[in-house]
Amino acid sequence: MRLLMGSQPFDPAREPHVFRLAMSDYAALVLLPQLMTVLRRQAPNVDLLVSQASREVMMAQAVDGEIDLALGVFPTLAEDLRTSLLFEEHFACLADRASLGGETTMDLSAYLQRPHILVSLRGDTGNEIDLALSAIGHKRRIALALPHWSAAPGLVPGTDLVLTVARRILPRDGEIGPLAIFAPPFAIPPFAFRQIWHRRRDGDPAHRWLRDLITGILAPPTGAPAAV
């Protein structure tokens, strides 16, 4: 029966469907506002159940069939998982403008003298930022570690804290009210943001429709990369 259903096209304008997605609040910030706008307009009977977990747990959930699709950073993949690259993300720094003393950026020495906010599910230093600092022989002081991307920028105003964060969650201009956005004073490799799913869902028309929709929202203008 499942094979027969898989051969039928999915009509998002008419058919009801529930998708189970796993993602961080970073992924929710960059995807869900646009995705929900499209769904309410083009697929009013499609519902989403969104959960959050570590990348290891999300991969296990995809393998076990607990979720349909996971979005995040997956340097390695479990067996039988498929992936498509959605974009490469870069980092930016956020600081209180008044604390910069009229400057619009800071050098590495000033950066290291400041206390920092770390966004991490586990609160450890095994992240892209601290690994890049360690590679050049430096370490920063983490004054606050928290798992919430969306809350972090609001903790900077009126303090000497620096937040180094994924660029897409910040406005495109160089200032946010009392805050300044500037490039990190050292090289941090970008990270690849992906969607992953189990190969058993490759031929599911509804699942393929959702993957293509997400790719259309988040992938670069050069076109949608092929799944591998």
Image (cartoon, rainbow, N blue to C red):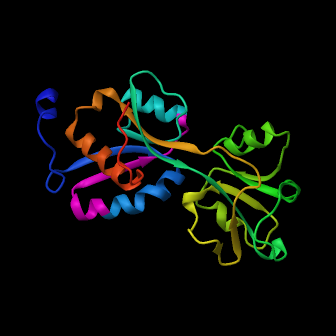
Where is residue 223 shown, x and y percent of the image?
A: 35, 48
Tell me: residue 114, above or below residue 205. Answer: below
Task: Decide if residue 44 is in sight here.
Answer: no
User: Residue 107 appears in which quarter of the rendering?
Assistant: bottom right
Q: Nearer the viewer, residue 102 or 76?
A: 102
- At 77% from the left edge and 66% from the top edge, which residue is drawn? 105
Q: Is residue 52 magenta-colored? A: yes
Q: Nearer the viewer, residue 51 or 30?
A: 30
Where is residue 124 shown, x and y percent of the image?
A: 73, 40
- At 38% from the left edge and 40% from the top edge, which residue is drawn? 69
Which quadrant does the N terminus fall into? top left
* Span shown in magenta: 38-55
Which quadrant does the C terminus fall into? top left
- At 28% from the left edge and 32% from the top edge, which residue is drawn? 201
Task: Decide if residue 135 is in sight here.
Answer: yes
- At 40% from the left edge and 50% from the top edge, which residue is drawn? 219
Residue lying farthest to the top in this orientation: 79
Tell me: residue 52, above or below residue 158. Answer: above
Where is residue 99 shown, x and y percent of the image?
A: 82, 72
Residue 16 in the figure: left or right of residue 167: left
Residue lying farthest to the front in this orientation: 222
Q: Is residue 223 magenta-colored? A: no
Where is residue 214 shown, x and y percent of the image?
A: 35, 50
- Marker count (numbered): 0
Residue 33 in the figure: left or right of residue 73: left
User: Residue 166 appears in which quarter of the rendering?
Assistant: bottom right
Q: Nearer the viewer, residue 59 or 106?
A: 106
